[in-house]
Amino acid sequence: METYTFLRQLADSWVMLAIFAFFIGTVIWAFRPGSTRVYEDTSQIPFRHEDKPATEPVSGTKETS
């Protein structure tokens, strides 16, 4: 069997199945029950300090002078 033919058949069958499984796993990970709070918090980031600048640095970042 030629190398190209083998790789083509492999990509058409098993690699496509692996990509599909990865996609389904990603969808399940995104819609898992515990992630709703995290996504709601993340979606509110642009609106947190609408009236005034932040008075204290966000946790995990350094404040520059």
Image (cartoon, rainbow, N blue to C red):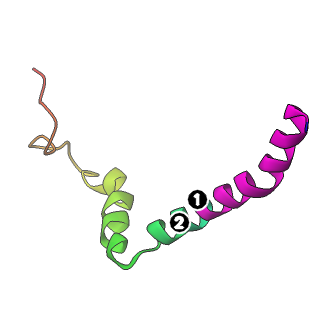
Q: Secondary structure at mark 2?
A: helix
Residue type (three-letter) at the residue carrying disc 1: Phe
Q: Nearer the viewer, residue 47 or 11?
A: 11
Q: Is residue 30 above or below residue 10?
A: below
**How far apart, in angstroms, are the residues tagged by discs 2 and 1?**
5 Å
Specify whether residue 14 is painted magenta: yes
Q: In the drawing, does residue 17 fall left or right of residue 41? A: right
Q: Secondary structure at mark 1?
A: helix
Q: Quadrant of residue 18?
A: bottom right
Q: Residue at x 13, y 23 (%)?
A: 64
Label of residue 2 in the image: none
In the image, taking residue 51 as reference, residue 64 lies left or right, namely: left
Residue at x 34% of width, y 58% of height: 42
Could you say where residue 10 lies in the image, as x and y percent from the top left? 79, 48
Residue 41 found in image quarter: bottom left
Q: Tell me, for residue 25, which label it has, or none.
A: 2
Tell me which residue sits at (67%, 62%) in the image. 20
Given residues 51 and 60, the one toward you in this image is: 60
Residue 31 as seen in the image, left or right of residue 50 = right
Question: Which range is magenta?
Answer: 2-21
Q: What is the x, y in percent for residue 47?
A: 33, 55
Residue 22 - label: 1
Crowd tier of the residue under label 2, counting other residues whose Cα lies within 10 Å: few below 14, some 14–19, many 20 or above: few
Which residue occupies the extreme front position in the image?
1
Q: Are marks 2 and 1 in contact (CB under 8 Å)?
A: yes
